[in-house]
Image: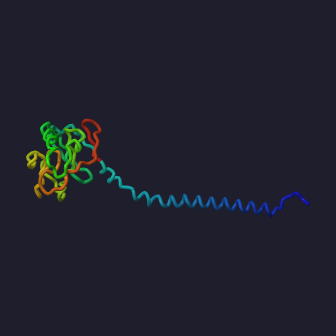
């Protein structure tokens, strides 16, 4: 009897390990190929660069004098930024206790009392209220007035009179410095 292994058994083992290697390699190459083929389809679902650019707006507040308002565009909507006077702040805080259709305290609507930032779209039918420019009607409460259906907003943008069901919305914003705000 010979101690040598059967050469046929060795070839069978080599054949099995070679087959396993080829199977694993083919599977790995196929998976990488599928991922590379799928990437363009997945990537096309990301928002376009122009859409990402509209997602936030930075505004320099330095040129806005006390008592002035400006309108900027964010996500295709007008945003009113008002540098409120001490009297407007006092009036808005005093109205916290008034009977409001959509009760919200002034402090919950502003981060810094002198700066009011809100989306300038009436919550009734989507009109743009007057009162942001000098000489425009400011309504019965000194804030904004929507002439389409008669909604009156106060100096904090809260609905006080008329058919609008909600206050003018406050967008997400952060102060980058004392004179710069980022909306969105």
Q: Residue at x 12, y 54 (%)?
A: 151
Q: Is residue 154 above or below residue 30?
A: above
Viewer can see residue 136: no
Estimate the x, y position of residue 72 in percent, counting from the top left.
22, 48
Count of picture labels: 0
Viewer can see residue 95: yes
Estimate the x, y position of residue 64 in percent, counting from the top left.
18, 39
Estimate the x, y position of residue 131 in percent, counting from the top left.
12, 48
Towards the viewer: 83 or 72: 83
Colour convention of the picture = rainbow
Is 125 placed left or right of 184 in the picture? left
Q: Residue at x 76, y 63 (%)?
A: 12
Estimate the x, y position of residue 50 in percent, counting from the top left.
32, 53
Towards the viewer: 62 or 97: 97
Towards the viewer: 162 or 82: 162
Furthest residue toward right: 1
Is 145 placed left or right of 10 in the picture? left
């Amino acid at each position: 009897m010979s101690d040598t292994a059967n050469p046929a058994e060795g070839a069978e083992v080599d054949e099995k390990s070679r087959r396993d290697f080829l199977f694993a390699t083919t599977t790995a190459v196929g998976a990488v190929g599928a991922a590379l083929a799928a990437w363009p389809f997945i990537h096309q679902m990301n928002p376009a660069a122009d859409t990402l650019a509209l997602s936030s707006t930075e505004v320099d507040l330095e040129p806005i004098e006390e008592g002035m308002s400006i309108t900027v565009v964010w996500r295709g909507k007008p945003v009113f930024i008002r540098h409120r006077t001490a009297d407007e702040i006092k009036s808005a805080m005093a109205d916290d206790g008034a009977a409001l259709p959509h009760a919200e305290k002034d402090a919950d609507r502003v981060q810094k009392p002198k700066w009011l930032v809100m989306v300038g779209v009436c919550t009734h039918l989507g009109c743009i209220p007057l009162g942001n420019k000098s000489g425009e009607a400011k309504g019965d409460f000194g804030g904004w007035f929507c002439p389409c259906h008669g909604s009156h907003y106060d100096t904090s943008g809260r609905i006080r009179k008329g058919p609008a069901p909600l206050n003018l919305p406050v967008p997400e914003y952060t102060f980058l410095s004392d004179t710069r705000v980022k909306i969105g």
